[in-house]
Image (cartoon, helix red, strand yellow):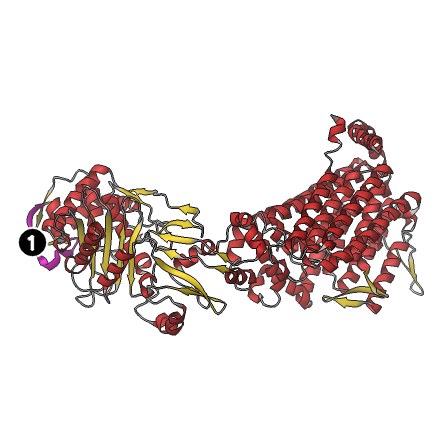
Amino acid sequence: MKSYTRFVKPVYLVILINLMGFLLLYLYKEPYDNITIFAGLSIIALICLTYALILKLEMGDEYLFLIVSMLMSIGFIMLYRLDKNLALKQIIWLSIGIIMFFACYYAYLKINMWQKFLYFYPVVSYILFIITIVFGGGRRGANNWIAIGRISIQASEIIKVLYIFFLASYYTDPDKLNVCPITIKGLNIKINISRQLIFIALNYIFIGFLFLQRELGTAFLFFGVFIFFLFIFGSRISTLIINAIMACIGVVFSYFYFYHIRVRFQTWINPWSDISNKGYQITQSLFAIGSGGFFGTGLGLGRPDFVPEVHTDFIFSAICEEMGIFGGIAVIFLFFIFAYRGFKVSLMVNETFDRIVALGITLMFALQTFIILGGVIKLIPLTGITLPFISYGGSSLVSGFISLGILQAISKKA
Amino acid sequence: MISDMDKYRNRDTDESTNNEEKDEKKKGAMGSKIINRIIYALVAVCILFFSLVAYLTYFELFEKNKIINNSYNRRQFEMEEKTLRGSILDRNGTVLAESEFSDGKQVRKYPYGTIYSHVIGYSSRKYGKSLIESKYNDYLLGINESSAVFNLKGKLSGETKEGNNIYLSIDHKLQTLANELMKNMQGAVVALDPKTGEVLAMVSKPDFDPNEQKLEENWNTMVESQSAPFLSRATQGLYTPGSTYKVLTLASALENGMENDIYNDKGTIVIDGKEISNYGGKAYGEINLKTALAVSSNTVFATIGVELGEENLRNISERAGIGEKIPFDIPVGKSVFQYKEMSKTDMAAAGMGQGKILMTPLHMALVSSAIANNGIMMKPSLVSRIETQNGTVLKKHKPEELYRVMDQDIAMKINEMMQEVVNNGTGKNASIKGIKVAGKTGTAENELTSRQKGKEHAWFIGFAPADDPKIAIAVILEYSGSTGGSAAAPIARELISAWLKG
């Protein structure tokens, strides 16, 4: 009996989804394009190979990767349907991502001094931020890309990981954040700045840089993770409340002083009044979601291409149109069980630093998913950010696999 | 590899036993406070994800229908251009509306021009859609959940899809006749089958030509026109029912044991200082209810109205569905009984169908059909079935009860009295040789009659054959100035006779 159940494994579901998806895509258009079959088989091969290695090398929680591979498959099928060339590029990013997954897994396990670089993380992050501001190129109103040769990298995707490590190093041992009393010469005044105040200031510098680069989604994401951390590890609840109030004031302030923030809110509350212009993206997204119904139009039979940015931020709308609201709910649930496994890892592990990193990664994924999905269905104001493992984008995918590799390593320790 | 997996599996199942030990350690290292807070964070994340699912479901169920037809949704046009819109036919298969491709563009054609403008409506690229064309748009275009699955082959091959055909319960011959009988008068005719609620003919005048080109030519003048040609009077027009309402007053009187009462009709009566008189001031002397209905005595029905009192009057009008939304295939105006508190003069006015009671012609036809159908009002219906191009029936009308207005014995008695109206009373013009016709006339005062004479609405409601009713009718001629008996009853007679003999 036991040997039988072993073969009804979730990995077969992942393979089945890919087989069905790519077969449909293959049969959909004449003349039949053999590249479709090649793409499908290479995705299946990559997933199976990685999964086999995870089992063989006993790399801890096998389900983390399985959930991700299911999400990735759904995203990849949809991406291939939307734009074949982008999907083929994504295979390359996926391969790099999986290599990074293993590399980070081993790096995290072998190097045991991550918590010692408390100052390193913010400093490197800030340097990256400054480089993007000075040398960076703009895309879609945001100024957040560093070009290296022909490849451009979204710095904030790397900074996400650094930020989690920074949080974890601080909360593992807050005393490490050395504070020298500031003496102002001549006046004989000594100002003692509390450790916590400096920590909070460092956090807001992260968020401030993101805001400057107009990466509102990521800024919102960092703030969300920060608030969750204050709640979990903060000694006083008053700090949390003060921060929340300050944030509200900040939002109100920027609503009146920054035009692009005001637009976000206005198009959230009533996108119909300026449907041809500012409300265009979100209303097209809603049309797509609404057109699918519960069961969807079927793969390749809808018109998700009417939605702008459909392959990155709005890929969920395309999934809802062609795979239905039920398909969309399946994606949400997959992210949810992924978050659940992540929380479980963080509860099981013994080392404080590991626990916090696991928690940070999990929260980062969960909140990012909520921010973009809530945005495209108009539950919350829309702020552009990718949907982890599903949206097209090399930086996002590779960064996702780096985080996954670290989480995998922690699950091994648990 | 298998043994490896086993190891991991065992570890997984052993978790529970290890948990306690681990928890001990955790408490030492981190404090249970933090563990608890992590669990709170998990709960918070859980709530966030479920709010996504909940909102998505809410959006699908309630929000999307409001937005999906927005003109910025390009899917609409694409779907419409690719699909040959289905036809609309009468009960015998006469084509009333069909689409054709000409020069690669679809054109909607209405071969009978104005006759169906207030039944089918129009489907125009420029002006949108109305009535059946709007309400059944999805069927006409063949959009529904199941077709997405079953029509996969057609979709894949990319050939032009054909929408579904809609068969109305309307009879084209009867509709044409009704249209001719109305000539250039303003008003409405509704004929239905009292046993099923199926509408056989429905004409509203004035009307318009729904063909795209004509619509474009006349749109502006029609929108501004005082005669309101876009108003579907049969379903949307609200009129004082006048004496036709007396059948409902009568029903309440019979229910309250007033069947054998005798009234002394002196031609006029003063109630609370207000004088009420019969049409033409005629006095009929000592009469019973039957005669009172036949001669349409206002003084008697005003007296009955006061005797019944507010509660009974309100009660019968509610049972007849006045004040309720009547479900129908096209939008229907809500008939109203607009009294908050009734004085005696109000009761007297209500008893004879004047005052603050307003009804649609469709509703009056339904009242007539309820009496014909032993007191049961059937749900009115216009679409009898929907078929795909290859004849599969997607939807078929099933007769449904709408309201039980009165008991069978009461309905039978009113039926008999209404026959007397046609045989010896005000409705003689509706009588047909060899057919028992039941009816009631009405000459309703309205907002114009107080200022000038000769602007009354002429009403007639009725059904036939009285012992086995097959058609129930309501006719109204707006501001005609003639009596229901002289102007409206002949129209009903022609239609009844055509339907029963035809």
Which residue is more in the foreground, A274 or B115?
B115
Which residue is more in the foreground, A400 or B213?
B213
Point out residue B117 in the picture as x, y percentages from the top left corner: 34, 62
Which residue is more in the foreground, B213 or B156?
B156
Residue A186 among those drawn in magenta: no
The quarter of the picture where the C terminus of chain A appears is top right
**Residue lying at 48% horizontally and 70% vertically, measured from the top left:** B103
Residue B328 in sight in this render: yes
Magenta-tinted stretch? B271-287
Point out residue A211 in the picture as x, y percentages from the top left corner: 75, 62
Residue A227 in sight in this render: no
Instruction: Using the rendered view, name the quadrant where residue B398 is placed.
Output: top left
Q: Secondary structure at mark 1?
A: loop
Instruction: Using the rendered view, name the quadrant where residue A65 is placed.
Output: top right
Question: Label 1: few (<14), some or many (≥20) within 10 Å?
Answer: some
Q: Amino acid at mark 1?
A: Ala
Q: Which residue is mark 1?
A: B283
Residue B421, relative to residue A149: is it above or below?
Answer: above
**Residue lying at 75% horizontally and 27% vertically, measured from the top left:** A2
Instruction: Using the rendered view, name the quadrant where residue B278 is placed.
Output: bottom left
Extreme residue in the front direction: A31
Point out residue A396 in the picture as x, y percentages from the top left corner: 78, 55
Residue B277 among those drawn in magenta: yes
Q: Chain of mark 1?
A: B
**Residue lying at 12% horizontally and 39% vertically, measured from the top left:** B260
Point out residue B113 in the picture as x, y percentages from the top left corner: 33, 65
Residue B456 in the figure: left or right of residue A397: left
